[in-house]
Structures are given as structure tokens and as C-alpha cells.
Amino acid sequence: MRTIEEHAQALAVGRISSRALVEQCLARIADPSGEGSRAFIKLHVESARTMADAMDLLRHAGRAPGRYAGIPVSLKDIFDIADEPTPAGSLVLADAPPAVAHAPVVQRMIAAGFVPVGRTNMTEFAFSGLGINPHYGTPLSPWDRSAKRIPGGSSSGAAVSVSDGMAVAGLGTDTGGSCRIPAAFCGIVGYKPTACRVPIAGVLPLAPSLDSVGSLAPSVSCCAIIDAILAGEAPDLPASCNLDGLRVAIPRNVVLDGMDGTVANAFERALTTLSRAGVRVSHVTIAEFDQVSAVNAKGGFAASEAYAWHRALLAEKGGGYDPRIRVRIERGERMSAADYVELAEARSRLIAALDTSTSEFDALIMPTVPIVPPRIAELENERDYNRINMHILRNTTLANFFDRCSISLPCHRADEAPVGLMLVGETLGDRRLFSIAAAIEQLLSSNQ
């Protein structure tokens, strides 16, 4: 996979045109042997071609809106696009009134010259980390494809669109891991920003207290470029930090439980590589992590805030929901106002405590997901679906709950199952985290 910067260089010197890039993506989407029909819910074929031609003309005239103008991207089916409904992977909103304007994040991508090729599939209403969608089909992880393994969710189509070359990068959302989990399962990079940095207006909500807009892409630099654009900042490539003396903490508790052998081996190998490069790796117990499960026992922000948004729609069209998603939303009905207030207070207290207990470290490090992508067939039983979903979400949800920025990057070898290495930075420490991730990405790739 070529990075955004590599495509920008090729466009700048005329080695390729935006129209050619878009046609390559559209051809991969249309390939009947590929995952295009499951990765995308709607295509924007003619508008993509028109925009690509416009970017080529503007670049030729020296008037391109930016360095990355003309690069094709995918948009998760959760973002408002003017004059289209926003179904969020569901059938119950397929005939909803069209959006009157682009979501700000979509508008910022278009203003920078990126070319949207279509809306990508997702877990219905973004409420699962598995990526399964009974309405539009489930795109498959690129690893061991014949075994039909899940892509991770909820930004399932976004991840597969990138891994399969149907887009250079994908825009997704992350409420509990929805960018990082599919990135880990599809062998790419996924980013969750500090939530307040990127606007969520025009994004169909799951839990506004936790929702964030991030990206899925071939490299750390790709995610850094998109993150800057989404945050209204000038995009640039992250400068790799000096790893010698970098301080990272591995939590002993919670995040290492239940790892399968493949993940454990790749994770330990990555830690060994980091240590040899001078990274100071400390194993610590983080007491705050042990408290999260009890604090969220009644459903947490996801169930309560999702139910508040969906209550009227459930009463009108509840039968059209994926039953596994509906039952998760309906948990919020049982939460009282007092429960919600207690939850918010507990979160604030735990955030402050974690900020203190991790202040001496540059980042936390852990496996993104403790297992490799399971087969879709393994999730047919309701109990297995729920158990595996919670296991997959366990590590990534911590960054959302504690309001941290976080990134997943591949740490497996080319012939192995995909494994994600997750770094968690400080609140509003996004630039620093990109610098750390860029250095680790370069180190790991040179040691494969």
C-alpha cells in the first residue's frame, strides 16, 4: 500500500493523475471477486470522476487546493453528506430525510481536495467491535480470506477499503475502538484523536461523551495528515522522536488477559525490539483500569446515550434493527438519571487519577486486540457473539473512557496473522503520540 505522501509526490511530478487513481480504486471496488460490494454501501462514481478531473486541471494550472488534492478516500456511512440520508449501516434510516450539508469533517476533507469514492459499510449504528452487518453483508478481513474472518468494527468497510486498495485512506469514527480494532484486524493503522479536537457535528451519534472521528490508513503519517485536516490544522508529516530513553508503560492488569498465542508472540517480539532500541519499558499495575468494568456495569455512556437518541426510532421501527444491536441500545432504558450522573462523576474522578498515575510515562503500550480475527461462523451463537465482542473491545475502550488519544499500528510479520500494537498518549497529546508512533513504526518495519 502506498501512503498519502507517496501519492502526493507522484501527483506533484505528474507520474499519475487523480483520475487514474480514482479509476484504480473504482476498478477494485467493482471486481466481482473482491469485497467491494460488501465494503461499500453507496458509491459516488460520477462525482468522484468529476472531482478527480477538476483536481487534475487545478494542479496543472498551479491552483490545487492542497498537496493532497485528488487522492481518493472512503467515508464511513455515519457522516452527513449533503443531499443524502445518513443510514449508519441500517435499513431503518435508508429513507431518512437527506442531510442539508456536509458534516464539518467531510467538508474539511473535500476542501483539502480529497476525493470521496463512496460510503463504507459499518456495524449498524456503530454499536459493536466485530464489524458484522446482517443488512448489507460483512466485508472480510484480508487475512485468511477463505476462512471468512471478521474485519472488526464498527468501521469495517473503511478498513477493508484501505487494505484492498479501494481507497487510499478511510474516514471512520471511534467510540470504543471502531477505528483501531478494524485497523488491527486488517493490518493497517487506525487513529483515535483526543475527542474534542475534531468536530462531531453531522456525525450520527452513538455516545457523544465518547465519540471521536479518526482515520484508517496505510501509515502513521497518513493518519497524522488526515487528523490535522480534520482538526482544522495545517497538515504535515510527523517527525519521529528519539526512542532512546523513551518511557512506556505496559499495564500488568486487564489488557494482557486472554491473549492468544499469535498476539502474545507478536507483542513480545515488538517489546524486545523496542527495548533493544533504548526504550525504557516498565510493567505497572494501573488501578484505574480495574474500576472501569464496575463503573460501566449498567451500560455506560454507550447504552444510555444511544438509547436517548434511538428511543423514538425504536418505538417506530424497532423491528428493522439488527436484534443484537437493538438489545445493546435498550440496556440504556434501565439507567436512571442518578445512574448517569454517578457514571459521569466516576469518569471524571478516574481520569484525574490516571493522569496522575501515568504522568512519568510518554505512552502506554498494549495489544490493540488480544486475539486474531475470528471466523464469522464462530459468532453465530448469541453468547459467543457477546463474549467475543466484549473481549475485542476491552483494551481499546480504555482510551475513550479516559479521554486519551490512541493509535494502532501493525506489529506482525508479513506471513503472520494481523496483530495491532496500541499506543495511548495523553489528553491533547496527539502530536507527541504521532511522533512516538512514527518512530516505532519505522523501527518495527525495519526489523521484520
Image (cartoon, rainbow, N blue to C red):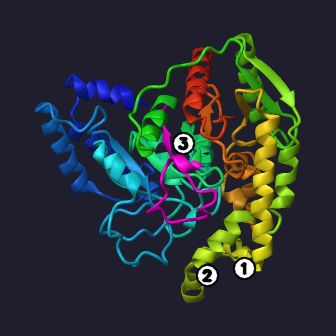
Image coordinates for residue 15, horizontal then vertical, percent: 22, 24
Q: CA distance from mark 1 to mark 3?
A: 38 Å
Q: Which mark is residue 111?
A: none
Q: Residue at 80%, 50% (x, y): give it.
A: 350
Q: What amino acid is labelled 1 in the image?
A: Glu
Q: Is residue 119 above or below residue 235?
A: below
Which residue in the structure is indicated by mark 2? 311
Q: CA distance from mark 2 to mark 1?
A: 8 Å
Q: Is residue 344 above or below residue 221?
A: below
For marks 2 and 3 on the same chain, the one whose residue lies earlier in the sequence:
3
Q: What amino acid is labelled 2 in the image?
A: Arg
Q: CA distance from mark 2 to mark 3?
A: 37 Å
Q: What amino acid is labelled 3 in the image?
A: Pro
For marks 2 and 1 on the same chain, the one whose residue lies earlier in the sequence:
2
Image coordinates for residue 80, horizontal then vertical, percent: 40, 63
Element carrying mark 2: helix
Q: Residue at 65%, 60% (x, y): give it.
A: 128
Callout 2 crowding tier (Cα within 10 Å): few <14, some 14–19, many ≥20: some
Which residue in the structure is indicated by mark 1? 333
Q: Residue at 64%, 41% (x, y): give it.
A: 427
Asked whether residue 71 appears in the rendered view, the answer is yes
Callout 1 crowding tier (Cα within 10 Å): few <14, some 14–19, many ≥20: some
Residue placed most toward the observer, 88 or 136: 88
Is 291 magenta? The answer is no
Callout 3 crowding tier (Cα within 10 Å): few <14, some 14–19, many ≥20: many
For marks 1 and 3 on the same chain, the one whose residue lies earlier in the sequence:
3
Quarter where residue 295 is shown: bottom right
Which residue in the structure is indicated by mark 3? 142
Image coordinates for residue 29, horizontal then vertical, percent: 36, 50
Is 202 magenta? The answer is yes
Region of the chain picked out in magenta, as a range: 195-219
